Image (cartoon, rainbow, N blue to C red):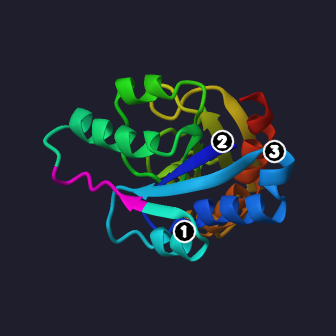
Amino acid sequence: MKNIVILISGGGSNMAAIVRAAQRERWGAALGAEVKAVISNRPDAGGLAFAREHGIAAEVVDHKPFASRELFDEALAAAIDRHAPALVVLAGFMRILTPGFVSRYEGRLLNIHPSLLPAFPGLHTHQRALDAGCKVAGATVHQVTAELDHGPILAQAVVPIVPGDTAQTIAARVLTQEHLIYPRAIAQLLPTL
């Protein structure tokens, strides 16, 4: 079985979309894969309850007690590796990972970013798209590299920016698309692992 470990920091809506797709599409039988664990860097992350309710191991590796990113990433990797992952999926995981962590999972570490990369890496993507006068916004699923919000693109979704839009209205439309493209990109990648 190809184990998937999902990392979250909050409510975990993308994680939930992946779990629901895995169940609905029977990834276990069809792809030999299952979501094995959900790990958060925040003890209060709402997505942990969803994982537990769906019979998925839910763990916390709180980043606050660690003196450095490297020490946190070592502890996080140890927690991930207990589940023998074929794939590690960042789903609203709000920590910048060290190059050593990224290289450990090279080729099997995914992220979703709320812009049409390479445009607008980093934070405040929707406001930046509005400020730049963009006519479209969107989301990108990509493999993670040591450079923030770069790496091979696996999937993208485009949404229009319409008159009267705010960063919040764009975010809501983009999130709907994220919930569709992230599980699809994972399902397409799994047979290659």
Neighbour tally class for label 1: few under 14, some 14-19, many 20 plus, Cα within 10 Å = many
Amino acid under disc 1:
Ala
Residue where numbered disc 2 is placed: 141
Label 3–label 1 contact, CB within 8 A:
no
Secondary structure mainly formed by the magenta segment: loop
Q: Which mark is residue 51?
A: 1
Q: First in sequence, mark 2 or 3: give its number.
A: 3
Q: Secondary structure at mark 2?
A: strand
99 above or below 164? Answer: above
Q: Position of residue 52 (x, y in %)?
A: 52, 72
Pinpoint residue 96: horizontal percent, then vertical percent.
Answer: 36, 40
| Residue 168 percent coordinates (x, y) | 55, 68
Magenta residues, as a range?
59-65
In front of the other: label 2 or label 1?
Answer: 1
Q: Secondary structure at mark 3?
A: helix
- Gap between marks 2 and 3, in whole Å? 20 Å
User: Which image quadrant for residue 1?
Assistant: top right
Q: What is the x, y in percent for residue 20?
A: 72, 66
Per the image, the residue denoted by label 3 is: 31
- Among numbered discs 2 and 1, the one appearing first in the sequence: 1
